[in-house]
Amino acid sequence: MAQSYNLLSNARITAIGSYVPESILSNADLEKMVETDHEWIVRRTGIEERRIAAPDQFSSDLCIQAVADLQRRYGVQLDDVDYIIVATTTPDSPFPSTSARLQQAFGMNNCGAIDLQAACAGFTAALQNANGLLLSGAARKVLVVGADTMSKITDYTDRSTCILFGDGAGALLLEAEDNRKGDVLASYSVTTGSGGHHVYLTGLSEVVGEHKLDNPGKVVQNGREVYKWAVGTVPEGVEKLLERAQLQVSDLDWFVPHSANLRIVESICERTGIPIERSLVSLVKYGNTSSASIPLALDLAVREGRLEQGQLMLLYGFGAGLTQAGVILRWSLPKA
């Protein structure tokens, strides 16, 4: 088990954007596909519906729409972006990268571009990496996007997983600002690879260690084990992250966890002492969108006018790997 953190930053958030596909898959729709019902799904997960990408719509398309939304709302320049980081578990292809497709779409011709795969911890891990690039001086402007088309890897005959997942994308633009304390106050990450076989998607190998993998090409999850791991370890990570920032729960304005399942979020809040009404989630209407869930939750709050400059928020992603990554931000973005 390895962990890391930092307490330095000169990164400022200057724009946010998001996008979800038009097609809606409701709980009523799922009732016609598998043995389930609306009340059971809501009781177990809190999810009412999710958005589903079209057959010819992929993660890069969602990224492009989210960044177009960011540019339209905040009027920012993108031709001087130094680096693009796309957090995704469902790239259009192993290569070329989804980030390269995004670079081409906006003509950002003098920047690096990488895909980062940390599953549901992907967006917060990408923020950590972006902050490092800005802090080191290797970049002055970094575009961070979380995007997934989970519907393309979901087995719609498996009621334990098909009720969970949806598609979407969210983006943040971060810029270095000298002689000013940045928006990223602290970060924390931890990985428990021994639990990797509890949630996976097959690739070139058919095993994880000594564990043989099933259902090629579709996400497989041991929900009971993932739940136990999340509620048993995420609260500890949240506490450690607060320690790094020398903050208390009472100092936080918002908690933005990965929108995996409302019952998991409720358990984490109960164990950390964070009031559930101070949590921001995107799962009710969008489902579990993996790398996109945290930026979608943030942008929903922005659009609803709930975020104010100067507010403190703790973002925490957790998922396959088993991986966790969290950051504490001071929100400085003015209302668009």
Image: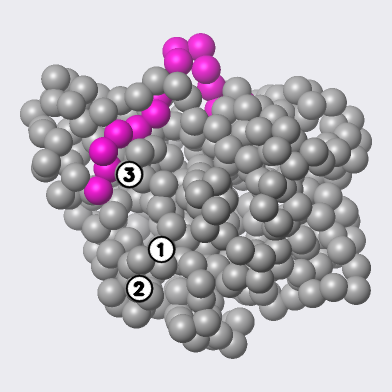
Instruction: Please check the rendered image and state whether residue 254 is part of the magenta-colored stretch, yes or no.
Output: no
Occupied quadrant, residue 10: bottom right
| Residue situated in front as seen by the camera: 149 or 12 | 12
Q: Position of residue 115 (x, y in %)?
A: 65, 39
Within 10 Å of disc 3 (Cα), the crowding (few <14, some 14-19, many 20+) is some
Residue sitting at x 36%, y 45%? 283
Extent of the magenta region:
46-60
Residue sitting at x 59%, y 56%? 125
Residue type at mark 1 is Ser
Instruction: Please check the rendered image and state whether residue 53 is part of the magenta-colored stretch, yes or no.
Output: yes
Occupied quadrant, residue 138: bottom right
Q: Position of residue 52 (x, y in %)?
A: 40, 24
Residue sitting at x 28%, y 64%? 266
Residue under pointer 2: 275
**What is the C-alpha distance between the residues marked 1 and 3?**
13 Å
Residue sitting at x 45%, y 22%? 22
Tell me, yes or no, whether the two marked residues, 2 and 1, touch with CB atoms within 8 Å: yes
**What is the C-alpha distance between the residues marked 2 and 3?**
18 Å
Residue type at mark 2 is Pro
Residue under pointer 3: 284
